[in-house]
Each structure stands twice: as structure tokens, then as C-alpha cells.
Image (cartoon, rainbow, N blue to C red):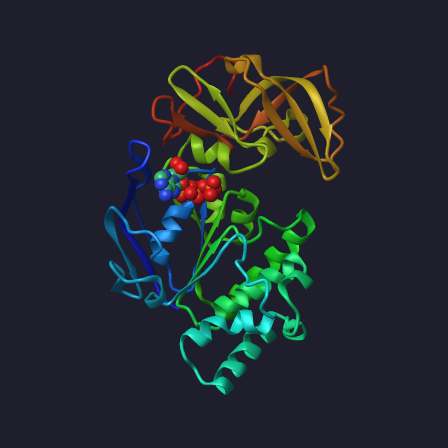
């Protein structure tokens, strides 16, 4: 186990007139932490991970693992293990030989290698598959082989690049739980790259949200969700995203599940009360999504309310009802920078009480 430090790291690719893939990123993990790098395609997640692994050199900045500077150190000397999206298993080798491969490179003796392979395979529940070839395994089993192969090297840091993206939805859920359980047992500092906010929320101790090469926010899933640092984080995390409406000099944000029919919420001073014209009702099983507009909030932006389907509010498409957001659930963002600002008094008459 080890602390990973990324110190003011920038990566500029010279191709195509110069692409700034990673822009002055700075963070430190806790020892044993599961840190998720989350962001849309092209935001620099993989580039950052490859620099930590030593597969790419930073243009500037430093990376430390366990307090040691990594600059100039090749991947094999970094005590890291990387699991790729594709798992990169050798198709013609047995599962045993796949897991054994990094140990052969370390020139360990046969008995020691055997013990390590069987320990890792046992930990991941694939001991019975050692004689098979990768093509004879399911996607989830292949993922476990890739993890076992990473584990036998006793890395101080695990780097995982979208390891679940090739699995179908059902398998993804169970693989996510397995991976979390695996991390709990081995306790190795892990950096996990994904563009899937559900994965990030469910797995990370903390989430680093990236956009256009920059770190927008590094915080616990709860903080990211309830106290997003800017409008990018507010709308990237959460599905449906946070509602954002433009006011005179700022943006007002509130989560759909905090936008509730007035009849369901006891009134308190400072709450936002507004008519909501419901245009569409979507029943999604556990939840009901109401889509519409709140003209009094100053614009025609579509906003959403998410209600548990166990609560029958009787709200139908085509109706207009008063809806409420609690004062504590209102978030404020600067209209120019998008950054979160302090609470403001809502100034439109009738929009707040
Ligand atoms: P995805 O989720 O699609 O994998 P990502 O967040 O991992 O995306 P990166 O692969 O890190 O993003 O890419 C960040 C930016 O750097 C992109 O604009 C990409 O086109 C660019 N880039 C990545 N590798 C290179 C390279 N070798 N040469 C030039 N530009 C590159």
C-alpha cells in the first residue's frame, strides 16, 4: 500500500497543433483509498492514469508513489499494476499462465510462483478455471483473471482503466460489487477511471471529476452530489442532472428529487415555491419523472422532478401545480464562471417565500 501524489501535472501532446490533455492536476490519495477519476470522453482520464503508470511522461509536474519520485522510472519499477479495459489477456495461454506471466518476468522459482498464482486465483474465486483459455471464460471471469494477474505482483497502487465497460448491464452491477469487495480485502490504493457516474458514486471513497484536462472537484460522492463545485459537476453527476435556471445575476440549481409538490412538503421560510407546468410523466418503476417548465423561474428551460412511485401525488401531464424546493436544497452558481457561490436571497416576487 502507498500514498499516491500527483503534483501539478500537465501533459501536452505535440501532435495536432498541441493538445492540452491534462492541465495542472494536483491531488494526493489516502493510503488504501479507492479514488475514482470521472469525466466525459476526452477529458484526460486515461492520459493521467498512463502518466501514473509510467507509460506516458508528464510535460511538467511530478508523481510520487510511497513518497518516492517516479520521474524517469519505467513502468516495471513503479510497483503499480494496471488493468486495462480490454483486460489484455494472452489468448493462447491458459489462465494459470496468464496469471503467472508477470511472475516469470520477475524470475521467481516455480514453487513460489505456483503458490502466488493459486493464492490470487483463490482470492478471486477462479481457482477452478486455471486450466482454461481466456475464450472459454465469461466477461466477468476474464476481469477476475486480469485482476489476479495484477494482484500477484503485490502492487502498491492499482490502476484500473474502465475495467467494467465491456460487460453487460447485469454483469456490471455484480462485477462492481465484486471489485469493491476485492478492494476491501486487499486494501491496496486504487485509482479507477470511468465515465460512468453511477460506477463512480457507488465505488469511490472520493471522486475526482475532470473536464477538459482540469480537476473540477475532488470530494466524497456525497459532497460531489450535494455540493457540486460548479455547474459542470452539477450536471455531469446525477441522472437526471441537477435542474439549473438562470436568474438575474446567477444560476439557481436544485436536484430533481428535491423539487416536490407543495402538498407533500411542510412550509418553512426561505423555501422556493413556484408553479410547475407538467408536460410529461414518465413511470420508471421505482420512480416517476415529471418533466415540464416553471415559467415563474424566469425562463423556459425544462426542469424535472423525480418522485418515488410509492407516493401517489396525483400529478398528471398537462396540469399545473405548486412545487417547492427547500431553502437548504438550493444551490447557487456564478453565471459567468459557473462556480458555486454563497446562498442569495431569491429576488423574483412570488418565487420565494
Ligand atoms: P476516453 O474516456 O474517451 O478514453 P479520456 O478522458 O481517457 O477519454 P484521454 O484519452 O486521456 O481522454 O485523452 C485526452 C485528450 O488528449 C483527448 O483530446 C485526446 O484526443 C488527446 N490525446 C490522447 N492521447 C494522445 C496522443 N497520443 N497524441 C495526441 N493527443 C492525444
Residue drawn at x 58%, y 68% is 93
Question: x and y percent of residue 245 in the render?
Answer: 49, 21
- Judge by depth and name the residue closer to the eye, 190 or 94: 94
Residue drawn at x 44%, y 72% is 154
Residue 152 in sight = yes
Q: Most extreme residue toward the left, as rendered?
A: 60
Question: x and y percent of residue 80 in the render?
Answer: 39, 64
Q: Is residue 148 above or below residue 256?
A: below
Q: Is residue 116 above or below residue 40?
A: below
Question: x and y percent of residue 301 in the render?
Answer: 54, 17
Q: Is residue 321 above or below residue 105?
A: above
Residue drawn at x 43%, y 30% is 231
Quadrant of the image where one finds ligand 1: top left
- Judge by depth and name the residue closer to the eye, 54 or 302: 54
Residue drawn at x 56%, y 21% is 273
Q: Is residue 208 above or below residue 258?
A: below
- Judge by depth and name the residue closer to the eye, 90 or 204: 90
Picture quadrant where residue 277 is located: top right
Q: Is residue 267 left or right of residue 137?
A: left
Picture quadrant where residue 210 is located: top left
Image label count: 0
Q: Is residue 267 left or right of residue 320?
A: left
Question: x and y percent of residue 34 in the render?
Answer: 46, 58
Q: Most extreme residue toward the front, as rendered?
A: 92
Q: Quadrant of the N terminus?
A: bottom left
Amino acid at each position: 500500500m502507498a500514498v499516491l501524489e500527483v503534483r501539478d501535472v500537465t501533459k501536452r501532446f505535440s501532435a495536432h497543433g498541441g493538445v492540452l490533455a491534462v492541465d495542472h492536476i494536483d491531488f494526493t490519495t489516502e493510503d488504501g483509498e479507492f479514488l475514482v477519476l470521472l469525466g466525459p470522453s476526452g477529458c484526460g482520464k486515461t492520459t493521467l492514469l498512463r502518466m501514473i503508470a509510467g507509460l506516458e511522461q508528464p510535460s511538467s509536474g511530478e508523481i510520487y508513489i510511497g513518497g518516492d519520485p517516479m520521474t524517469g522510472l519505467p513502468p516495471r519499477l513503479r510497483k503499480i499494476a494496471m488493468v486495462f479495459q480490454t483486460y489484455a489477456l494472452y489468448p493462447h495461454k491458459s489462465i494459470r499462465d496468464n496469471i503467472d506471466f508477470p511472475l516469470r518476468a520477475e524470475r521467481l522459482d516455480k514453487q513460489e510462483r505456483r503458490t502466488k498464482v493459486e493464492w490470487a486465483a483463490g482470492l478471486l474465486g477462479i481457482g477452478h478455471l486455471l486450466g482454461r483459455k481466456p475464450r472459454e471464460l465469461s466477461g466477468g471471469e476474464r476481469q477476475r483473471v486480469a485482476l489476479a494477474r495484477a494482484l500477484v505482483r503485490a502492487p502498491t497502487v492499482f490502476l484500473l482503466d474502465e475495467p467494467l465497460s465491456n460487460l453487460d448491464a447485469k454483469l456490471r452491477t455484480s462485477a462492481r460489487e465484486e471489485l469493491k469487495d476485492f478492494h476491501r480485502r486487499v486494501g491496496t490504493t486504487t485509482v479507477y477511471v470511468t465515465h460512468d457516474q453511477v460506477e463512480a458514486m457507488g465505488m469511490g471513497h472520493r471522486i475526482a471529476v475532470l473536464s477538459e484536462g482540469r480537476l473540477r472537484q475532488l470530494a466524497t460522492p456525497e459532497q460531489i452530489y450535494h455540493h457540486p463545485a460548479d455547474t459542470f459537476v452539477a450536471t455531469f453527476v446525477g441522472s437526471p442532472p441537477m435542474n439549473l435556471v438562470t436568474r438575474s445575476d446567477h444560476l439557481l440549481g436544485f436536484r430533481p428529487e428535491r423539487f416536490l409538490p407543495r402538498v407533500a412538503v411542510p412550509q418553512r421560510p426561505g423555501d422556493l415555491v413556484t408553479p410547475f407546468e407538467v408536460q410529461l410523466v414518465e413511470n420508471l418503476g421505482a420512480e416517476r419523472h415529471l418533466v415540464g417548465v416553471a415559467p415563474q423561474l424566469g425562463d423556459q428551460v425544462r426542469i424535472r422532478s423525480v418522485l418515488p412511485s410509492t407516493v401517489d401525488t396525483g400529478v398528471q401531464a398537462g396540469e399545473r401545480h405548486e412545487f417547492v424546493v427547500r431553502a437548504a436544497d438550493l444551490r447557487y452558481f456564478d453565471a459567468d464562471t459557473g462556480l458555486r457561490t454563497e446562498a442569495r436571497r431569491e429576488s423574483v416576487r412570488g418565487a420565494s417565500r
